Amino acid sequence: MPTLLLKMIRYVYKKPKILFVGINPHFGSFARGVPFSNNKQFWYLLADAGIIEEKRDELRNDEILRRVYREKFNPVYGLGLVNIINRPTKDVTKLAKGEELPGRKKVSRIIKSQSPNVACFVGKVTYEKYVGLRNFSFGWQEGIGESKVFVMHFPLRGEAIVRIRELQEIARVASGLDEAGTPTRTNSEQMNGRKAPADGDRESPSRA
């Protein structure tokens, strides 16, 4: 049996304030046993947004990141993470048609049973796979059960400040400090009086 198949990601999502939903892991993340650890940009953005206390320099260390994910991500920070599809691929173009269907039910079941304050879908492609539609914008969507739903830009290939502001908005709503309805405009859009940069409208198929 190849060594890679002995590795796996143990997803954590017990009663989180924010549940992050990804599409599927990259081989590198799968081998490390930590979601989004192939390039770590997702983790850097969490740090920059003030959602976790660790700094970028700490998170670059695989062992520290693994410890943060296993020991602090859910029990300390109140965060959760699950992928729609567990099978690792180099990018989403390698996924089979319909492979997401069992994962849709899994994610719905987790959101409804764990009732996160916010379910955040990481990237437009992830939410497309979940709802089976493409006609939506980044930002707030129709809720699922008691949870509010947000679609954020994928961590790669775009302005970090857009993603940081999205995460900060999500964190405020999840903490009950802000009231979110279902409009698709984010705080950054409202502040600027215009649509947020469309750097991720059609996202790269790269995996994290």
Image (cartoon, grey):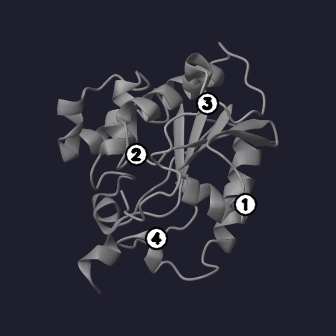
Considering only vertical position in the picture, is 162 above or below 199?
above
Considering only vertical position in the picture, is 163 above or below 95?
above
Image quarter (top left, top right, bottom left or bottom right) of the C terminus:
bottom left
* Viewer-proximal residue among 140 and 76: 140
Q: Amino acid at mark 3?
A: Lys
Label 1 packing within 10 angstroms: few (<14), some (14-19), many (20+):
few
Residue to which mark 3 is pinned: 17
Q: Amino acid at mark 2?
A: Pro
* Viewer-proximal residue among 189 and 91: 189
Label 4 packing within 10 angstroms: few (<14), some (14-19), many (20+):
some
Residue 92: assigned label: 4
Residue drawn where x is 80% and y is 36% of the image: 146
Residue 66 falls in image quadrant:
top left
Q: Nearer the viewer, mark 3 or mark 2?
A: 2
Image quarter (top left, top right, bottom left or bottom right) of the N terminus:
bottom left
Residue 155: assigned label: 2
Q: Earlier in the sequence, mark 3 or mark 2?
A: 3
Classify mark 4: helix, strand or loop.
helix
Residue drawn where x is 52% and y is 61% of the image: 23
2 and 1 marks in contact (CB < 8 Å): no
Classify mark 3: helix, strand or loop.
loop
Residue to which mark 1 is pinned: 131
Label 2 packing within 10 angstroms: few (<14), some (14-19), many (20+):
many
Considering only vertical position in the picture, is 202 above or below 72?
below
The x and y percentages for residue 160 are 36, 35
Q: Earlier in the sequence, mark 2 or mark 1?
A: 1
Q: CA distance from mark 2 to mark 1?
A: 21 Å
Q: Amino acid at mark 1?
A: Val
Label 3 packing within 10 angstroms: few (<14), some (14-19), many (20+):
many
